Each structure stands twice: as C-alpha cells, then as structure tokens.
Image (cartoon, rainbow, N blue to C red):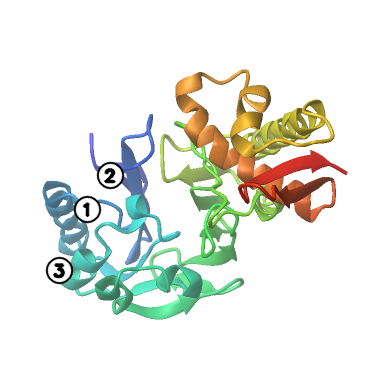
Amino acid sequence: MRPRELSATLSLFPAKTPTLPPATHTNSYALGGRDVLLVEPATPYESEQRAFIEWARSLVSHGRKLVGIVPTHHHRDHVGGLATFSRELGVPVWAHEETAARLEPEARTCVTRFLAEGDTILLDGLRPETWRVLFTPGHAPGHVCLFEEHTRTAIVGDMVASVGTILIAPDEGDMERYLVELERLAQLNAFVALPAHGEPIDEPTQLFRKYIDHRLMREAKVLESVRKVGPNGADAASLVPVAYDDTPPHLWPLAKLSLEAHLAKLVREGRVIAAHRATDAAEFFRVV
C-alpha cells in the first residue's frame, strides 16, 4: 500500500527504481505537518513519477505547503525524478554541494540551496519540527542525513538499509569515513531510522553497530587474505575468493568493489602496501 502514514507529520512513498538487488524500490518521505519537505526524488520511471506527483499534490490539497525537495545523495535511484518533480510541483531542491555537482545539468539547475553540516530546516506546523543536517559521506561524497531532535527520527538514506546491503565503491566511497559516520549515527540514540530501502528501523542504534561490526569483520578478512598470499602480493581479483569465501560467487563482482574500498583504507593506514608490477602495471597488495 502507498503512501503510508507513519505519523501525523510523516509519510512514506516507496517507488520502483533501478536500485541494487535485492531492493526494488526507493523510499521517499514527506516530513512536516504544515510545511512539508519531500526527501528522495527517486524514481526515473514515468508511471511512478505520476504517482509521486499525485501523492505530493494530495498533501497540498489538505492544506499543507511543499517547501523543498532534498536528495540524500546523487545516485540514480535517489535523484531519478528530481528535475521532473521540481518542475511539476514548483518546489526548489536543496542538496549538498558535492551532490549538486554530480547531478545532470537539468537537475543541477533546480538546486537553490546548498545544505551543509549543522544547517537546520524548520518546518512550521501545530508542532514545528527542526531537522538538522548531518553531512555523512562515505557511501557517496555528498551524502546527508536529517535528524529531528524532538521525535529522535533520523532520515538515513543509504547509510544503512533494512533490505539488501550498502555498497561502498572505491571510485567515490570512503570506507574509513563511512565507519566514522556510522558511529556518529549510533551516538544519536535515535528512536527510529528511515532508510531509503526497506522498512523503518525500530532499533537503529543496534543496526548501526551491527554494520560497524560487520565491516570490521570483513576488513580483518581482507587483511588476512593479503597476508596469506605472501610477500609477492596479489591483485584485488585474486583476493576476493579468500576474503569473501562466505559469499556466493555470483556476488563476487560487487564484493570486489567493497574489497577495493577496504584495501584503500588499509593502505592509507599503512597496514597494506600497494605497488604496481613492472610487467603489466597491475596494482597488487601485500602486508607491511
């Protein structure tokens, strides 16, 4: 069923998106009792966009006012409808500068405000809400979360998910920063976390800590896999079957991306050395 009313001032609208399986949808949220902030202009599909616009307009028909649209980050399953929704609803987009820089030109022109760490978004209503912006890169360079102190509600984008997993890709992800920001989210002591994929999370602190523990477990396996290959080192593809021996082989291409993010962290920390073979310029890794 959609949309779903989570409270008098919070609703969820899941829409089909080209996201990473097993997820099939991205959650959009409407925050606020009178002033309304739409989070995650996600879907690129026309039929889904029409349903989203109908939902958003229904909020206005009940006396509420759309004040802004916020994408948590720039990935395609989060901004596929950004330009269309901004244009059709006449609502400005607010995004982190790093997110705006990665949008398609048409979508980039819709951004009228750059969000930064510590900014607040005040939503008027019978009980005004103040949503604090948290700059949480790691999964994506411009990733932001939103936190409302009174209700202790966190909008967490792709920091965690209740379906599937979160990919930290080496080209734009940062495993070290991701872990730092997960710890920061854990310290919020949030009552509920609202992810982009899956159901609301009723015990978010526990899940944040679980994510941290899992990544550190995987990091230890990555380090051990490098140690096992010996002093001559090995490339990332050769390390995957060792570090991800508990993962089905059909997932190894994605696992390789995560492994490379772990390796980048270990290299920065001085625990692993990255070098290039003179023969083919391939990068290989060995322990210090």
Between residue 92 and residue 181, name the one nearer to us.
181
Quadrant including the N terminus: top left
- Kindly indicate whether the residue at mark 2 contacts the one at mark 1 (C-beta within 8 angstroms): yes
Is 75 drawn above or below residue 284 in the view shown? below
Label 1 to label 2: alpha-carbon separation: 7 Å
Which of the two labelled residues, at mark 1 and mark 3, occupies the earlier sequence position? 1
Q: Amino acid at mark 2?
A: Thr
Residue under pointer 2: 17
The residue that appears at 34% across and 42% down in the rendered structure is 19
Residue under pointer 3: 88
Of marks 1 and 3, the one in the foreground: 1
Under circle 1, the secondary element is loop
Residue 30, percent across and down?
Answer: 34, 56
Please identify the quarter of the rendering in which residue 229 is found: top right
- In the rendered structure, the answer to whether residue 90 lies left or right of residue 42 reads left
Q: Residues within 10 Å of mark 1 (few under 14, many from 20)?
A: many
Between residue 39 and residue 136, name the one nearer to us.
136
Residue 68, percent across and down?
Answer: 33, 71
Label 3 to label 2: alpha-carbon separation: 19 Å
Q: Amino acid at mark 3?
A: Glu
